[in-house]
Image (cartoon, helix red, strand yellow):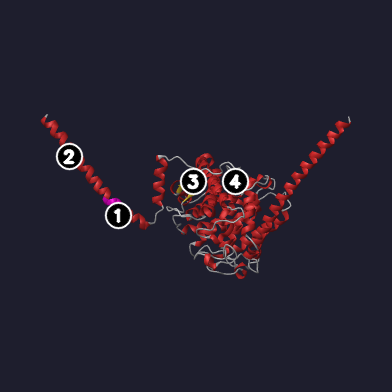
């Protein structure tokens, strides 16, 4: 009897110990989530608060392109915070989220009020196509905010988005900006410009894919982060929306993109070094942690990533956050500086404005997942670079993703690559193709003539 009681105490003690470990793990993961939320607030509050007061254009520092600055800053910030704003009210974050929803409503009202100082520019230049696409993507993700807008404001947004059909996109990632806006219009109104919608989707799925999870930014492949900034996240959201609207019609393309996207997330994870640093290359690096936009989006829409656990991705992203976002990245008024680490104006291309840096808000998309989601609850696991540089003997962590080539896909690839060439290139190609086609036709006709002549000769004489 005494032995039985002793064993019972041991079992209870063991259970309490395991519960303690589990509670500590949960507590630690919630600390990570709290850290992320505090960083997101630090980025978004100056934009939301000032724009809600119609003072963003007055308070925000100007580097260049002030005429696009308000829409660019708010569109990208809202895109990053959208999933969190759409989260159901059942956490300790509810009061903070309610505050930000209220601010978002005021911001949108001011942005679409022609008499407001922070009125969004939709009519001048071509840059509004880019920035409106991020706003449209955020509104697609955040149905709650859209439903809170009054009918007149909803119609105003739809009208302004339709007006952007005046902008002819370049044959690169800009095609997806048009597709995103048309997807928004299709979902909210039931109508769209099908050419602008499907050209972006099919051009990337068939025309611009170069292999191993990577798309070219148009017909040429260039080494940058645009697969993460734009291509994979927008393509995925567009396809998910089209699947909702059209049933199973886009299932095959969605499965294909999901495999490519998962491979790209693997490549991003490999790039996060053991101290959280990221390799800096390509254009638009002043978008900072927006480099990991694709990773942040994928964990929100997919159940798993091959060869990676959610805990592994969380730890890698958390290390990147702590390494690449500090107080040095903000000015005295709380606005993000232009640069990758601190203020670095020479890193900024000629299209960069003070609003461009706010693309980094997309890093925080996983905050739109419930605190009970595996991304937040999975056990800690060191990411790939840590395992490799610690001399840990691990199984192979990498395997290229290779798709079989079919005649149909090769034909589609040729068509969409040609379709998106500039008129200058098309005219030069025709200058070559037309004479060659004429010579080929003459050659075929000549061969047929001699063939018929020989046949006729043999028939006549034999």
The residue depicted at 47 percent of the width and 41 percent of the height is: 403
- Label 4 secondary element: helix
Residue 440 shows in the view: yes
**Given the current orientation, which residue lies at the most extreme front position?**
391
Predominant secondary structure, magenta span:
helix
The residue furthest right is: 2
Q: Which residue is mark 1?
A: 431
Q: Which tag, 4 or 3, sits closer to the chain's start?
A: 3
Disc 3 crowd rating (10 Å Cα; few below 14, some 14-19, many 20+) is: some
Residue 454: image quadrant is: top left
The dot on residue 450 is 2
How far across and how far down the image is residue 233, in percent?
A: 55, 50
Pick whichever of labels 3 and 2 is earlier in the sequence: 3
Q: Secondary structure at mark 2?
A: helix
| Labels 1 and 2: the sequence-earlier one | 1
* Distance Cα–Cα, label 4 vs label 2: 64 Å
């Amino acid at each position: 009897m005494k032995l039985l009681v002793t064993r019972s105490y041991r079992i209870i003690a063991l259970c309490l110990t395991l519960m303690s470990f589990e509670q500590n793990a949960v507590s630690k993961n919630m600390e990570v989530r709290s850290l992320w939320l505090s960083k997101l607030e630090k980025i978004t509050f100056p934009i939301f608060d000032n724009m809600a007061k119609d003072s963003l254009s007055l308070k925000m520092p100007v580097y260049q392109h002030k005429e696009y600055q308000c829409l660019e800053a708010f569109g990208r910030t809202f895109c990053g915070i959208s999933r969190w704003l759409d989260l159901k009210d059942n956490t300790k974050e509810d009061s903070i989220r309610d505050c930000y929803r209220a601010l978002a409503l005021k911001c949108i009202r001011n942005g679409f009020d022609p008499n407001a100082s922070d009125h969004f520019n939709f009519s001048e230049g071509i840059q509004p196509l880019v920035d409106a696409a991020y706003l449209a993507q955020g509104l697609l993700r955040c149905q709650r905010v859209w439903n809170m807008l009054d009918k007149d404001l909803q119609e105003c947004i739809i009208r302004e988005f339709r007006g952007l059909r005046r902008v002819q996109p370049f044959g690169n990632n800009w095609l997806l900006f048009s597709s995103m806006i048309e997807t928004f219009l299709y979902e909210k109104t039931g109508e769209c410009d099908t050419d602008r919608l499907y050209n972006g989707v099919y051009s990337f799925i068939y025309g611009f894919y170069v292999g191993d999870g990577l798309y070219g930014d148009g017909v040429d492949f260039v080494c940058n982060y645009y697969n993460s900034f734009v291509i994979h996240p927008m393509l995925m959201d567009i396809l998910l929306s089209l699947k909702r609207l059209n049933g199973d019609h886009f299932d095959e393309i969605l499965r294909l993109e999901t495999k490519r996207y998962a491979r790209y997330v693997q490549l991003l994870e490999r790039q996060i070094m053991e101290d959280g640093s990221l390799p800096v290359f390509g254009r638009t690096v002043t978008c900072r942690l927006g480099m990991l936009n694709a990773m942040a989006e994928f964990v929100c829409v997919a159940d798993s990533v091959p060869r990676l656990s959610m805990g592994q991705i969380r730890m890698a992203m958390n290390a990147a956050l702590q390494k690449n976002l500090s107080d040095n990245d903000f000015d005295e008024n709380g606005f993000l500086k232009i640069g990758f680490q601190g203020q670095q104006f020479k890193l900024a291309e000629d299209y960069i404005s003070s609003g461009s840096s706010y693309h980094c808000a997309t890093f925080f998309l996983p905050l739109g997942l419930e605190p009970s989601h595996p991304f937040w609850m999975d056990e800690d696991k060191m990411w790939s670079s840590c395992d490799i540089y610690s001399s840990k003997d691990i199984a192979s962590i990498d395997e290229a993703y290779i798709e079989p080539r079919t005649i149909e896909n090769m034909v589609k690839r040729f068509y969409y690559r040609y379709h998106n060439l500039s008129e200058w290139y098309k005219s030069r190609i025709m200058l070559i193709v037309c004479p060659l086609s004429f010579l080929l036709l003459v050659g075929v006709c000549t061969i047929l003539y001699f063939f018929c002549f020989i046949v006729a000769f043999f028939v006549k004489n034999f």
